[in-house]
Image: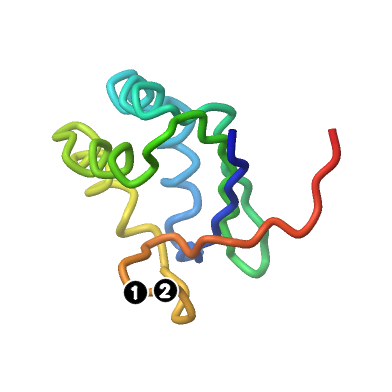
Amino acid sequence: MQRMGMVIGIAPEHIAEYKRLHASVWSTVLARLAQSHIRNYSIFLREPENLLFGYWEYHGSDFEADMAGIAADAETRRWWTLCNPCQRPLESRAAGEHWAMMECVFHVD
């Protein structure tokens, strides 16, 4: 299992909409995440900096293939058309990233 953290900005005028969307994430999107071995997924908001911090645990063996499966899913892509306009990707993110991945520097169970 891999613990993974990621960060992205959020437009302050879209925070209420983003919260509304995530109060009832579509079951098809949640099913696709589970099928791609994503568990224990949380998104946290930090204001006034307007940052979203995402955390999940990946339980699969082929992360790239699982992420490609999520990206190919029609319902997930439709979900992203609602969420992406709310988000502000960091300028410092790596090529090909929307959410910027973070390095885990500490963990304890």
Instruction: Using the numbered discs, state the Cα–Cα distance from disc 2 to disc 1 in whole angstroms.
Output: 4 Å
In the rendered image, the residue lying farthest to the right is 108
Q: Which residue is mark 1?
A: 95
Camera-side residue of 104 and 79: 104
Mark 1 residue crowding within 10 angstroms, few (<14) / some (14–19) / many (20+):
few
Q: Residue at x 76, y 59 (%)?
A: 105
Establish if 54 lies above or below 86: above
Q: Amino acid at mark 1?
A: Ala
Whether pointer 2 and pointer 1 mark residues with C-beta atoms closer than 8 Å, the reply is yes
Which quadrant, please, contains the C terminus? top right
Instruction: Give the residue drawn at x 22%, y 49%.
Output: 81
Residue 107, image x and y in percent?
Answer: 80, 46
Return the x and y of residue 14 as percentages of the image width and height: 43, 56
Left-right relation of 83 to 13: left
- Residue 67 location (% of width, % of height): 32, 43
Position above or below: 52 against 73: below
Q: Secondary structure at mark 1?
A: loop
Q: Quadrant of residue 2?
A: top right
Q: Is residue 49 above or below residue 92?
A: above
- Residue occupying the far bottom of the picture: 91
Point out which mark residue 45 bears: none
Secondary structure, mark 2, is loop
* Label 2 crowd bin: few (<14), some (14–19), many (20+), radius 10 Å: few
Identify the residue shown where x is 44% and y is 60%. Answer: 99
Tell me the residue at 62%/42% (across/down): 3
The quarter in which the N terminus is drawn is top right
Q: Position of residue 12 (x, y in %)?
A: 50, 64
The tag on residue 94 is: 2
